[in-house]
């Protein structure tokens, strides 16, 4: 049926109902992309840890049938030169509904465009969900890391990340600059002959669907606030539009009432009767607030590039991107992935922390309703960290730690299940 993807003989597809709930069989087929760089190290460890947690939680009555699919460098080896993201990979991610991926390399400057972004755009995975919280014992550069407990809703399909760009001196850049100058009277391009250009589309629909998910999450998880993070004072019609549309949605769809004349508003949580405060913060100030007063922030709704910066910055406060998990989601399809990249200098050395991908898998199990297995992953990771048998990133910041390899950390987790 597929050119290079081997569908496991045992196992069934997860399917989606009209209300977007999932039907998860006891032996679901879950596609995975190994990933470039350190993907070769962390992905096998993630698979082993998840298999162990599922076996322990369900005593053999449930099991995942993993199905390898390809993207990135491995895809060019399997499918041939220049096939970085085969059509059948996209088709499988769409059809099998739940999947997980390792990181994929994107060159800086020229070369291929991001495959990670391409996956999100092609499948319209418009929410990038990145929870950030501290695990007891994890070394942190801040004094009170437990106060950082946020969930980032990063818009994943628009913004400068959409990749509409023209290189300096290219025909496209020349045409666009001419258009801006001659048709729109723009006089502010300082060095028109040598400027590259990027276009930043931000829409009301894109903002509303992201904000809807963020508020719903706050309702479902009894969170005290949703903060809209933007740079709307400078980019008025993109980031400023995001802020205004997000506030308007809170009022229009969730009955948000203005506080002291606005723009802050409060949404009554229909499940608890408590107020959820909807507020906003300008991105630069926000980056200092999260260091100085993290306890004041809970759910974050932001644009694509801000979300990228904020998720790594917040991860640093709770131990680094080595354990920061994430998911890319549409209403029906969810693709889980680590927050970090391919860390090429460590590739193939069995060295880095597999925690980020393992915790992404933990989110995946929860999404599937396999909460017992997810719980085992969390408890075994906590035990591994408190026993101080950790990978280099934690060991270098901890007193009295025993440094273990990437696969060694997986073994420690499995021992602790
Ligand atoms: N979703 C994705 O697939 C992503 C892909 N990328 C891509 O990855 C490539 C490399 O990007 P780069 O900017 O170097 O960012 P990376 O996230 O790959 O690495 C930056 C640093 O973060 C630390 N780090 C990364 N992974 C781990 C881990 N598993 N355990 C512990 N520490 C870790 C390392 O810090 P130290 O040096 O201190 O040890 C590393 O040098 C680029 O091509 C980029 O486009 C980037 C982000 C996301
Ligand atoms: O696609 C890439 O290479 C980088 C993406 C990234 O940094 C992210 O999504 O956090
Ligand atoms: Mg990033």
Image (cartoon, rainbow, N blue to C red):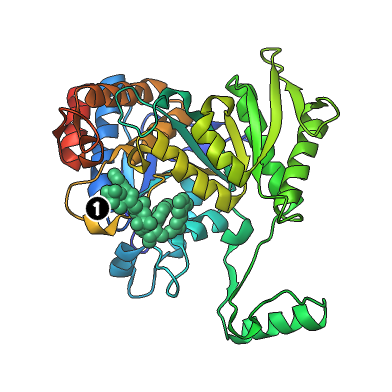
Res. 344 image quadrant? bottom left
Res. 227 image quadrant? top right
**x and y percentages locating residue 144 in the rendered image:** 41, 24
Above or below, 168 against 161 in this view is below
**x and y percentages locating residue 21 in the rendered image:** 57, 31
Res. 413 image quadrant? top left
**Quadrant including the C terminus:** top left
Choose between 236 and 272: the one closer to the eye. 236
Query: Residue sitting at 38 percent across and 42 percent down?
Result: 30
Q: How many numbered badges does the structure rendering display?
A: 1
Above or below, 70 against 279 in this view is below
**x and y percentages locating residue 288 in the rendered image:** 54, 39
Choose between 226 and 49: the one closer to the eye. 226
Q: Is residue 124 visible?
A: no
**x and y percentages locating residue 83 in the rendered image:** 39, 71
Above or below, 184 against 269 in this view is below
Q: Secondary structure at mark 1?
A: helix
Query: Residue sitting at 53 percent across and 24 percent down?
Result: 295
Choose between 181 and 161: the one closer to the eye. 181
Query: Residue sitting at 49 percent across and 34 percent down?
Result: 291
Query: Residue sitting at 51 percent across and 44 percent down?
Result: 310
Q: Is residue 371 visible?
A: yes
Residue at the outermost right position? 261
Disc 1 Cβ-to-ligand 1 distance below 8 Å: no
Q: Residues within 10 Å of mark 1 (few under 14, many from 20)?
A: some
Q: Which residue is mark 1?
A: 40
């Amino acid at each position: 049926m597929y050119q290079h993807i081997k569908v496991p003989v045992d196992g069934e597809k997860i399917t989606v109902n009209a209300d977007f709930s999932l039907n998860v069989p006891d032996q679901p087929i879950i596609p995975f992309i190994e990933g470039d760089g350190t993907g070769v190290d962390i992905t096998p460890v993630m698979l082993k840890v998840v298999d162990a947690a599922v076996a322990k939680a369900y005593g053999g009555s449930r099991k995942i049938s993993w199905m390898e699919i390809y993207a990135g460098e491995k895809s060019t080896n399997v499918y041939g030169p220049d096939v970085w993201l085969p059509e059948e990979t996209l088709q499988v991610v769409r059809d099998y509904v739940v999947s997980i991926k390792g990181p994929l390399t994107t060159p800086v400057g020229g070369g291929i465009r991001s495959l990670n972004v391409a996956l999100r755009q092609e499948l319209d995975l418009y929410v990038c969900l990145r929870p950030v919280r501290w695990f007891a014992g994890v070394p942190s550069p801040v004094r009170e890391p437990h106060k950082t407990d946020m969930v980032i809703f990063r818009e994943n399909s628009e913004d400068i990340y959409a990749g509409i760009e023209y290189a300096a001196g290219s025909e496209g850049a020349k045409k666009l600059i001419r258009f801006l100058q001659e048709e729109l009277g723009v006089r502010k391009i300082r060095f028109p002959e040598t400027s590259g250009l990027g276009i930043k589309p931000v829409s009301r629909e894109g903002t509303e669907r992201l904000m809807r998910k963020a508020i719903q999450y706050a309702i479902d998880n009894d969170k005290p606030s949703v903060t809209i993070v933007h740079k709307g004072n400078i980019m008025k019609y993109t980031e400023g539009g995001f802020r205004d549309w997000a506030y308007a949605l809170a009022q229009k769809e969730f009955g948000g009432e203005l506080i002291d004349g606005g723009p802050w508003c409060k949404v009554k949580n229909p499940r608890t009767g408590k107020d959820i405060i909807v507020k906003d913060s300008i991105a630069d100030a926000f980056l200092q607030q999260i260091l100085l007063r993290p306890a004041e922030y809970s759910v974050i709704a932001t644009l694509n590039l801000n979300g990228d910066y904020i998720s790594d910055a917040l991860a640093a406060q709770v131990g680094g991107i080595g354990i920061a998990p994430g998911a890319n989601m549409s209403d029906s399809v969810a693709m889980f992935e680590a927050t970090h990249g391919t860390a090429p200098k460590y590739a193939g050395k069995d060295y880095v922390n597999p925690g980020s991908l393992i915790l992404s898998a933990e989110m995946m199990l929860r999404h599937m309703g396999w909460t017992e297995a997810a719980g085992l992953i969390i408890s075994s990771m906590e035990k591994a960290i408190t026993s101080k048998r950790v990978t280099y990133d934690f060991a270098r910041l901890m007193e009295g730690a025993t440094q273990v390899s990437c696969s060694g950390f997986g073994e420690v987790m499995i021992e602790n299940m």
